[in-house]
């Protein structure tokens, strides 16, 4: 069973499973409905199953060593809170959707929920108690868990694995698949800007001031995909499943520093000129550089120019264009395609060992 869990935890399997589950629940929604996931019954049984599985996993020495590592304990707590708040927001949204379908309106609009109270003392007392509780929690934490401080910075020694702070581990995981300036600057900025832009791109006035799902289904779906699948998942992989030499390890696998994984990566230019045509790469010279990467440049151009035209033939995206207008729609499509490039590039690396579609180190342009 542990070997099976280690195998299925591999990103190419676990990531695929997450995407399939996400599509079945939020996009398809006929077999597995959001209503089922957001119900109290599902939440109760999911909590019981998760606690039982987590307890069983903690019986393994390798898994327990990762979980109780001082740096990882707060991350585990944060992930638990993210899971709970995501379920709770969906639960409240589905409850409101049921009320709206009955003509009752959202619960936030009822008389008992519209009562106004003074900030003093109601809000101030609540904040005071929250501050005291937080202080007590941190004090107890500091007593029972030793601070993971190490020796002063030593330029002759680096930890293995050398990991960024947990909130940057998603970016560090992207570096496996993209050039540093794309993974560290371009993609994160566009993903964050894209998530922030969703309420402004989607002009739907419904859902303001109250929980809902069906009235803002696609906005919520795209946000949850970018947040949970393309960000939180990468943090989980980088925190718990990346060991020495940034090699992937299963949750029950010992972190052996001598584990070696062959990286037989290849660029599209090498695949086209050397493997397919049996010729050396063109060069040197500026024109020869563009000739060398012509196949990759065509693929990138087709992706960003041809894909929007094909998407318009799909009824969902056609409706988006009619509702948003051309400017908002094409901005949405651009952000969508940039976001989708992350999982696409991950799959190309996992299954085809493809490193770069366009490899131009001469211009620091590696895609």
Image (spheres, grey):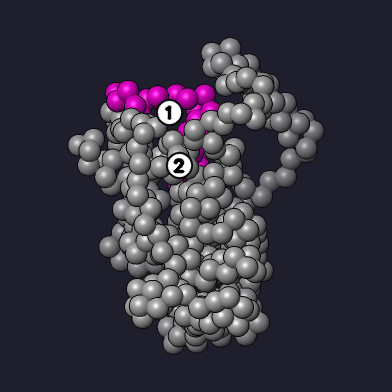
- Quadrant of the image occupied by residue 191: bottom right
What is the quadrant of the N terminus in the image?
A: top left
Where is mark 1, residue-wise? 67
> Which tag, 2 or 1, sits closer to the chain's start?
1
Residue farthest toward the top in the current orientation of the protein:
143
Q: Is residue 110 above or below residue 157?
A: below
Residue in view at x 45 percent, y 85 percent: 310
Mark nearer the viewer, 2 or 1: 2
Label annotation for residue 47: none
Q: Secondary structure at mark 1?
A: helix
Q: Position of residue 66 (x, y in %)?
A: 42, 28
Q: Is residue 333 above or below residue 353?
A: below
Residue 322 percent across, percent down from the top left: 56, 85
Q: Residues within 10 Å of mark 2 (few under 14, many from 20)?
A: some
Q: Which residue is mark 2?
A: 246
Query: What is the span of residues highlighted in magenta in the rendered image?
Result: 58-87
Q: How many marks?
A: 2
Hey, which residue is sitting farthest left in the picture? 1
Please tell me which residue is depicted at 22% across the width and 38% down the height of the picture.
3
Residue 12, visible in the rendered structure = yes
> Magenta stretch containing residue 85, yes or no?
yes
Does residue 299 appear left or right of residue 40 in this picture?
A: right
| Residue 340 can be seen, yes or no | no
Decide which of 57, 45 is in the foreground and name it. 57
Residue shown at 61%/46% (left/top)?
112
Q: Nearer the viewer, residue 291 or 12?
A: 291
């Amino acid at each position: 069973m542990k070997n099976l869990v280690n195998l299925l935890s591999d990103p190419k399997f676990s990531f695929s499973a997450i995407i399939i589950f996400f599509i079945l629940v939020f996009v398809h929604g006929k077999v597995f409905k959001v209503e089922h996931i957001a119900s109290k019954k599902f939440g109760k049984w999911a909590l019981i199953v998760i606690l039982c599985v987590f307890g069983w996993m903690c019986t393994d020495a390798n898994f327990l060593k990762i979980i109780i590592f001082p740096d990882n304990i707060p991350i585990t707590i944060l992930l638990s809170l993210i899971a709970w708040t995501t379920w709770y927001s969906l639960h409240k949204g589905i409850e409101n959707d049921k009320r709206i379908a009955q003509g009752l309106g959202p619960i936030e609009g009822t008389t008992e929920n519209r009562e106004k109270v003074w900030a003093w003392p109601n809000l101030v007392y609540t904040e005071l108690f929250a501050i005291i509780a937080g202080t007590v929690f941190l004090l107890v934490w500091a007593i029972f868990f030793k601070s993971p401080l190490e020796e002063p910075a030593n330029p002759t020694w680096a930890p293995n694995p050398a990991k960024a702070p947990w909130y940057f581990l998603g970016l560090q995981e992207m570096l496996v698949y993209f050039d540093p300036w794309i993974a560290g600057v371009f993609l994160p900025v566009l993903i964050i800007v894209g998530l922030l832009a969703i309420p402004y791109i989607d002009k739907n006035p419904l859902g303001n001031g109250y929980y809902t799902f069906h009235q803002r289904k696609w906005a919520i779906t795209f946000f949850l995909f970018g947040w949970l699948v393309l960000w939180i998942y990468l943090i989980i992989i980088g925190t718990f499943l990346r060991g020495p030499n940034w090699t992937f390890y299963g949750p029950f696998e010992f972190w052996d520093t001598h584990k070696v994984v062959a990286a037989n990566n290849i660029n599209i230019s090498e695949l086209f000129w050397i493997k397919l045509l049996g010729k050396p790469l063109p060069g040197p010279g500026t024109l020869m550089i563009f000739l060398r990467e012509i196949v990759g440049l065509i693929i990138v151009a087709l992706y960003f120019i041809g894909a929007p035209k094909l998407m318009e033939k799909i009824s969902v995206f056609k409706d988006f264009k009619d509702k948003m207008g051309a400017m908002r729609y094409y901005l949405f499509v651009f952000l969508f395609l940039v976001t989708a490039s992350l999982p696409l590039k991950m799959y190309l690396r996992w299954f085809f060992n493809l490193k770069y579609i366009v490899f131009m180190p001469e211009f620091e342009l590696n895609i």
